[in-house]
Amino acid sequence: MEKQFMLGNEAIARGAFEAGVKVVAGYPGTPATEIVDHCAAYPGVYAEWSTNEKHAFEVAGGASLTNQRSLAVMKHNGTNAAADFLMHINFTGVKAGMVLISADDPGGLSSQCEEDTRVLIHNYAHVPVFDPANIQEAYEMTKAAFELSEQTEVLFALRPVMRINHAGGMITYGDKTSVERKAEFIPDRSRFVMSAVVEKEYGGELRPKMRHRWLNNKQNELKAIMETSPFNWAEEGEGEVGFIACGIGYAFLKEAEQIYGKKLPVLKISTLPLPEQKVLQFVKQYKRIVVLEEIEPVVERLIKQLCFENKIMLDVLGREGYLPAEGELSANLVLTAVESAVAGQAFPNAVPGNYIPARTRTQCSGCSHRGLLAALQAVIRKNGGIVTGDIGCHDAGTFEPMKLQATIYCMGSSIPMAYGIKAAGFDKPAYALIGDSTFFHNGLTGLASAIANGANITVIVAYNSTTAMTGFQPHPGTGRSLTIEHGNPIDPGVVAEAMGAKVYRCNPYQVEETAKVLAEAAEQEGVKVVIAEALCYLKFGREGRVSYISRDVSINTEVCNGCSLCVRTFGCPSMTISEGKAVIDKSSCNGCGVCIWVCKRGAIQ
Ligand SMILES: Cc1ncc(C[n+]2csc(CCOP(=O)(O)OP(=O)(O)O)c2C)c(N)n1
Ligand code: SF4
Ligand code: SF4
Ligand code: SF4
């Protein structure tokens, strides 16, 4: 056993390595991203960034059926994108141990939406879930999940939350325990061919029903495992209220307990299915229990159902009608829950949550997206139109000062939403603005749909040669994978052209030309794709590669009249107004020159 300071994602990767993971596939997304990077650094592990989470899940599935342990890594939105495969591999089961990491972001600190993927993974797909309370447990659960998955032939999931993935601490870890095994695929069509065929051996039942029954029957085996799981335990304490703390809820309860000053009776549960006997034994001692979990009342409802079935009368207080139904838990919130429940009072309406400083979303100084957004803004101001947005660094264009994109939903939705708006009769041009990684993630099929349905839209692909927002991961348009430089980028423009779109190209640092191209494209009928190609400044600038000719940009104070248009409409962080004149902060300005175009008085030179 050794000790080392690790981040949560590093600890999860360590657990996977020790368990003998062979194939790791993921798609970047906070808070899960670094797990894949850390796995890639271990010897003998194949790790990749797939084009989207469904494909990552499928790659891992293929490896498991070939008798090699595998890991699929994604954030909660990704689990939604992968739900189709989830609802098949749950029924087939797996061969070698296979684990899905689905990282949730309670509070939506770094996501478009807040959700609890335990609902999808466990309530819906009936897959067992481990919910770690700290990073040591995340490491241990990852190892255990591989063993149990292989033992039961069921996919296992680990659902860490942001405060686990990104937390750091001392981890006690060990050596790689699993042995090398032969890669072999032994066909078993009654499992691995999911199809509506008749199963003679099962009395002529259709296979989907037979596999559903297999999964349902597995639940008893899984429940028995969770009954003796080292991740669930009861603690004695004072008082007449019992606390059931799940995952990170347990960590918050321990903090709250210290402030409260008394040892509370606690049942820690970090698994789904529930250890039902343990729960019954615990709840029978109390007239009131409080369930602490992130985010939905998953455990709470299961406990209510269990109590009902066992004719146990008690108050079960949790996210359903007691604690806030939305947002992150915190030590403060949990302390309030403890105090109110013990006093027999309702949970107070206003509890100070975690303080989150107000942030303005913007791009880096010198980002190519700003030139693109400025050009698009100018075209729309002149000719009218609507912009449907997508996720990525460019989505900052939807906020002050540009307020350009009218919609942001999930990855790839910009294109179908744009032509849906047109299909509804919108009579001005519709633009779909999408990043290059997102284009390959889920944009391609939307584009095919637009072309196949004779849409009239302009798709703008912000081709900055990286997945910038999540930390510069490669994608099919970059010519490299997670581990190798293969020099074979798929050019989104070539793909779009082959699909039948009319393709235009521009460099977004050349704002005037970009605006012309956008206006011209919008005038044409059909599906037009504008490839706005310029390297991400933050990633490639460090390597000395930029897509503009750098210049020393300054304000001619004789000409500047302080109208502040450059700051109010453009928003480069290097520009401010001081003493009635525009000012450029030379220490952060990188001389991209885009702002020169913004000042119509010619004061920026
Ligand atoms: C389904 C899903 N997976 C992952 C993410 C995390 N995420 C947000 S934006 C983004 C991609 C950004 O890359 P790109 O489209 O190239 O735009 P850029 O940031 O480079 O401008 C990702 C992976 C997400 N929001 N949803
Ligand atoms: S990381 Fe790159 S794409 Fe993102 S805002 Fe900065 S320069 Fe722009
Ligand atoms: S630089 Fe131009 S746009 Fe900016 S405040 Fe001066 S005159 Fe106005
Ligand atoms: S040149 Fe202008 S737009 Fe570019 S970084 Fe400097 S201030 Fe910002």
Image: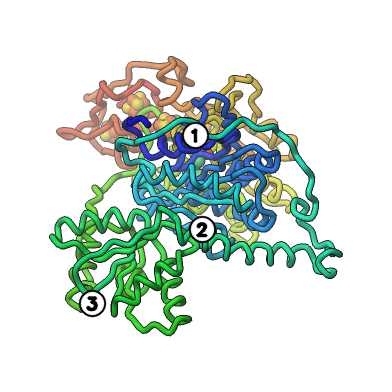
Between 111 and 265, the one nearer to me in the picture:
265
Between 385 and 260, the one nearer to me in the picture:
260
First of labels 2, 3 by sequence position: 2
What residue is pinned by disc 3? 346
User: Looking at the rendering, which quadrant does residue 256 occupy?
Assistant: bottom left
Kindly report which numbered mark, 1 or 3, lies closer to the viewer in this rendering: 1
What residue is pinned by disc 1? 18
| Amino acid bearing label 2 | Ile
Residue neighbourhood size for the residue with mark 2, other residues' Cα within 10 Å, grouped as few (<14), some (14–19), many (≥20):
some
The answer to the question of whether label 1 and label 2 lie on touching residues, with beta carbons closer than 8 A, is no
First of labels 1, 3 by sequence position: 1
Q: Is residue 30 left or right of residue 220?
A: left
Q: For mark 2, give the secondary structure.
A: helix
Say which residue appears at 63% left-offset and 39% top-offset: 529
First of labels 1, 2 by sequence position: 1
What residue is pinned by disc 2? 225
* 345 up-or-down from 453: above or below: below
| Amino acid bearing label 3 | Ala
Between 246 and 413, the one nearer to me in the picture:
246
Say which residue appears at 63% left-offset and 66% top-offset: 216
Is residue 382 in view?
A: no
| Amino acid bearing label 1 | Glu
Q: Position of residue 437 (x, y in %)?
A: 56, 37
Task: Indicate how the structure is coloured in the image.
Answer: rainbow
Q: For mark 3, give the secondary structure.
A: loop
Picture disc at residue 386:
none
Which quarter of the rendered picture does the N terminus lie within? top left
Say which residue appears at 50% left-offset and 31% top-offset: 176
Say which residue appears at 31% left-offset and 32% top-offset: 5
